Amino acid sequence: MYEYAHPNPDDHAAIEALLDLAFGADRHKKTSYRFREGVAPLPSLSLVARQDGHLVGTIAYWPVAIGKAAVPALLLGPVAVEPALRGLGIGVTLIRRTLAMACREGHRIAVLVGDADYYTRFGFKAAEGTGIAMPGQPDRLMVKALAAGALDGVSGDIRSWRAAGRRTMAA
Ligand SMILES: CC(C)(COP(=O)(O)OP(=O)(O)OC[C@H]1O[C@@H](n2cnc3c(N)ncnc32)[C@H](O)[C@@H]1OP(=O)(O)O)[C@@H](O)C(=O)NCCC(=O)NCCS
């Protein structure tokens, strides 16, 4: 019914249009976008959903670093589904599939800014109390260990991959 695949370069305009629809054309002003500026999303973790060839869902991940030690992590999102098709499981499928892919690739930590009611089902927990924080985002930050013990001893501010001086994602 829905097909899930990595996006083609041709999908770029449709992805941007769907994100504008979901988050507003001023979405780039959101705090989480600061961590995406000048950094490319990870191609192997970008996924789109299609119905009859029409793009109806999208998810992407950016690399970020945590704390002074610049521990690598994934910033999940943005994720969005065509308004008319929400509540049908597309979002859950996009997130479950890409988190499984991230685990298989050896990534160890995922973070996001989002609604706890939605993301708890994927094993995310509120970052509050963990020592992990996102400057400019006092609430709604969530974290998930993708491997056992991956969050042990990890604390500090989320930093842009570029600002942290990281080049390759040491998964
Ligand atoms: C959030 C979003 C990606 C979910 O995709 P979806 O395909 O509609 O979601 P699914 O059908 O897979 O999951 C539906 C479930 O999620 C719940 N849900 C959806 N959005 C939610 C939210 N913001 N908070 C809490 N629960 C939410 C639904 O109530 C439903 O719950 P149920 O399974 O218990 O019935 C989609 O609604 C969307 O594009 N929203 C606008 C953009 C957005 O907010 N993105 C997420 C950033 S936090």
Image (spheres, rainbow, N blue to C red):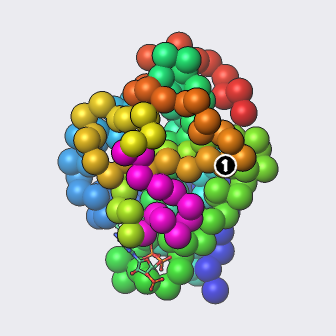
Residue named by callout 1: 146
Quarter of the figure with residue 135: top left
Side of 58 where 115 appears, left or right = left
- Note whether residue 62 is visible: yes
Q: Residue 64: x, y in percent?
A: 51, 31
Q: Nearer the viewer, residue 144 or 33?
A: 144
Depicted 152 relative to depicted 128: above or below: above
Q: Position of residue 95 (x, y in %)?
A: 57, 63
Ligand 1 closer than 8 Å to the CB at disc 1? no
Q: Nearer the viewer, residue 83 or 144?
A: 144
* Residue toward you, 87 or 56: 87
Q: Position of residue 138 (x, y in %)?
A: 25, 41
Is 65 left or right of 13, judged from the image as shown? right
**Between residues 97 and 114, which one lies in front from this camera angle?**
114
> How dense is the environment of label 1, judged by Cα within 10 Å: few (below 14), some, or many (20 and up)?
many
Instruction: Say which residue appears at 72% left-offset and 47% top-offset.
Output: 148
Locate the C terminus by quadrant.
top right
Q: Quadrant of ligand 1?
A: bottom left
* Residue at figure coordinates x 60%, y 72% from the top left: 93
On screen, residue 40 above or below 70: below
What residue appears at the point 56 percent right and 45 percent down from the top-left corner? 110
- Please state the extent of the stretch shown in magenta in the rendering: 118-128
Direction top: furthest residue: 165
Quarter assignment of residue 31: top left
